[in-house]
Image: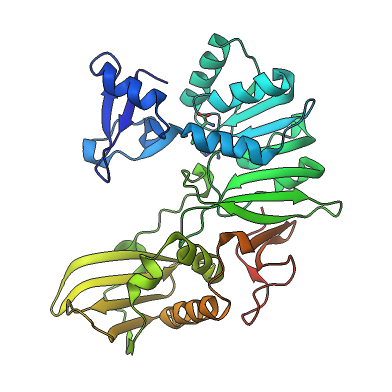
Amino acid sequence: MPDRVWLSREDEALTACDRGCEPGRWFAAAYGDVPVVTQVNDGREPEDPADAWPSSSASAPSIVFKMLELLELAPGMRVLEIGAGTGYNAALLSHRLGDANVTTVEIDPAVAGLARTNLKATGFSPTVVCGDGGLGWAAGAPYDRVVATCSVRHVPYAWVKQTRPGGVILTPWCDDWSHCGLLRLTVGDDGSASGHFTADSAFMLMRTQRSNLRLFRDVVMDDHVPVESATALDPWTVADSPFETQFALGLRLGDLWYAWHHDPDVEGVETRLWVATTGGDSWAAVDWDGVDNTERYTVWQHGSRRLWEEVEAAHRWWLENDRPGPERFGLTVTPDGQWAWLDEPGAGFAGGAGLKETGQRD
Ligand SMILES: C[S@@+](CC[C@H](N)C(=O)[O-])C[C@H]1O[C@@H](n2cnc3c(N)ncnc32)[C@H](O)[C@@H]1O
């Protein structure tokens, strides 16, 4: 761990914790089963400490070990890790497999430097590459396992290409609607990879897949004239619901994201849920008037797609399919893109639009 880490209590903002000033707090975090933020704002000092957001961290040991178990490692296997961070996971992998079999790629030069120093100090020397892990590391291929420690919206095809048939890719998953999930893919002989989602997890998004779309700068414009309608679907059911619901909706909806706006300074509106496409070309807003037991919410929709109707249809589909949890969903990655499915690869979404493209070709 670096001497300075960032910690937060409950949902509060991150605050710096220096080992020298607050050793008790620092050691409790270092040895606790919690994620510890080791870098904020891609290494730039935030102007206002309240604006600090995590850009590198040491994951909670329990999730590190859960992922290592899911990898089903065996002696002699060659592993590519994406996201070296502190170097902790690369050290564990090196201990298990020998450091000649481990390569780790880190995009941030300062973080990569820290990983190298830490690994050296613990007596390991796996290959530490500073670069974009989305490209994998062809020089060390083929790998038996690829494990990412940052989440992806699109599984880079380079990972599939660099893994031997029968090999495994394990990555945290994040779509635009929900932000959690672990995906375990097995690479086939035909150049594709398929597998199920396995567990709840939350990892920072891969830097090269970040989107910087802003609601009022890029999506909702003053000259838009939205169409008004009403809905009985409570917006909290789809955007503040248990992980299982949001996970299923995220896969089903593909390219939609949402943002809550409390006290939007609009007469008669207490809370508004915004929904938009990742391209920013369509949006919807659903208003709650602040009256308990409301069964009617006002809907505004703009653009070529009726986004709230898409959300309602996705929610209906989820109910009709017995509210499937993450384990019933899977993903297939081919050179042409990636597709989510329910229960069986290739089956697509029963009763829905069939196979759904959720990503771009790399
Ligand atoms: C949760 S941390 C990794 C924890 C690390 N495995 C450990 O044992 O401490 C995620 C890391 O992914 C890195 N990262 C983000 N985008 C990346 C990319 N495109 N390529 C490589 N690394 C990336 C971040 O800089 C960050 O250090």
Q: Which percent across, then down, holds residue 179?
A: 46, 54
| Quadrant position of residue 170 | top right
Q: Does residue 103 appear left or right of residue 304 in this picture?
A: right
Q: Does residue 116 appear left or right of residue 147 in this picture?
A: left
Q: Is residue 4 above or below residue 13?
A: above
| Residue furthest right in the image | 189
Q: Residue at x 51, y 78 (%)?
A: 319
Q: Which percent across, then down, holds residue 252?
A: 55, 70
| Residue furthest front in the image | 322
The colour mode here is rainbow
Q: Is residue 304 at all visible to an observer of this figure?
A: no
Q: Judge by depth and name the residue closer to the eye, 114 or 195.
A: 195
| Quadrant position of residue 214 | bottom left
Q: Residue at x 23, y 81 (%)?
A: 293
Q: Residue at x 45, y 77 (%)?
A: 311
Q: Does residue 205 appear left or right of residue 284 in this picture?
A: right
Q: Which percent across, then down, holds residue 83?
A: 55, 34
Q: Indicate the quadrant containing the N terminus: top left, top right, bottom left or bottom right.
A: top left
Q: Judge by depth and name the residue closer to the eye, 9 or 134.
A: 9
Q: Residue at x 64, y 74 (%)?
A: 349
Q: Is residue 353 at all visible to an observer of this figure?
A: yes
Q: Is residue 350 above or below residue 343?
A: below
Q: Does residue 294 appear left or right of residue 245 in this picture?
A: left
Q: Which percent across, then down, holds residue 314?
A: 51, 77
| Quadrant position of residue 88 | top right
| Total residue callouts | 0
